[in-house]
Image (cartoon, helix red, strand yellow):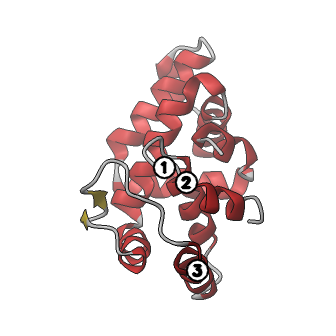
Amino acid sequence: MKAYQIFAGMEPERCEAFFRLIAEESPGAFTQAVYAAAAAFKSRPKAVVKLPFDKRASMVRRALARVSSNVVAEEMLAIYFLECKQDMLTEWLDALGIEHEEGSLKENNPAEPPKDKLEGVIKDFCAKDDDPDRALLLKAFGAQDAIDWPLLDAHLETL
């Protein structure tokens, strides 16, 4: 799964909550996403900025759901977890035993853990609570270009 596909499948309400948190925690990143959406739809950025938040979030989601926006979509997912949900991200990385610095991977292409370990970590991680960001984190992690983990990809199809 690619980052743009995550946004394509995201429910509008869920996406609005996603972007509200980014707008609060990293307003510059949300503004960048709004400007990217304006460019994607050939709209004036100032006109898009004036839209009510739910309309702006919807426009950004539709723009990020395009194949051509995959790089920006991947960046928005990274910002969400690095700046808004860092505790959850570090919990995931620590459980896998992946070296990181506050959620940023130290190694560019970490090796996929053995099947038993990965499946156990996924099961424990997802069972901790019913926060939908847990499944989103797994999808976002797997969508990174640096992650080539076939076992994780196979598991993501069931989420």
The image quadrant where one finds the C terminus is bottom right
Kind of residue sitting beneath label 3:
Asp
Tell which circle, 2 or 1, labels the residue nearer the N-terminal end: 1
- Can you tell which quarter of the image residue 86 is in? bottom left
Q: CA distance from mark 2 to mark 1?
A: 11 Å
Q: Which residue bears the numbered disc 1? A: 77
Q: CB of mark 2 within 8 Å of CB of mark 3?
A: no
Residue 90 x/y as whole percent: 35, 72
Residue that appears at 60% across and 11% down = 42
Give SS at disc 3. helix
Q: Nearer the viewer, mark 2 or mark 3?
A: 3
Relative horizontal placement of residue 93, taking residue 118 as reference (left or right) = left
Q: Given this view, does label 1 or label 3 mark the residue nearer the observer?
A: 3
Q: Earlier in the sequence, mark 1 or mark 3?
A: 1
- The residue sitting at 35% across, 58% down in the picture is 82
The answer to whether one can see residue 23 in this image is: no
What amino acid does circle 1 point to?
A: Leu
Q: Which residue is mark 3?
A: 116
- Look at label 2 and name its amino acid: Gly
Q: In the picture shown, does residue 86 fall above or below 66? A: below
At which x and y percent is residue 109? 37, 49
Q: Residue furthest top?
A: 42
Tag 2 secondary structure = helix
Q: Which residue is mark 2?
A: 142
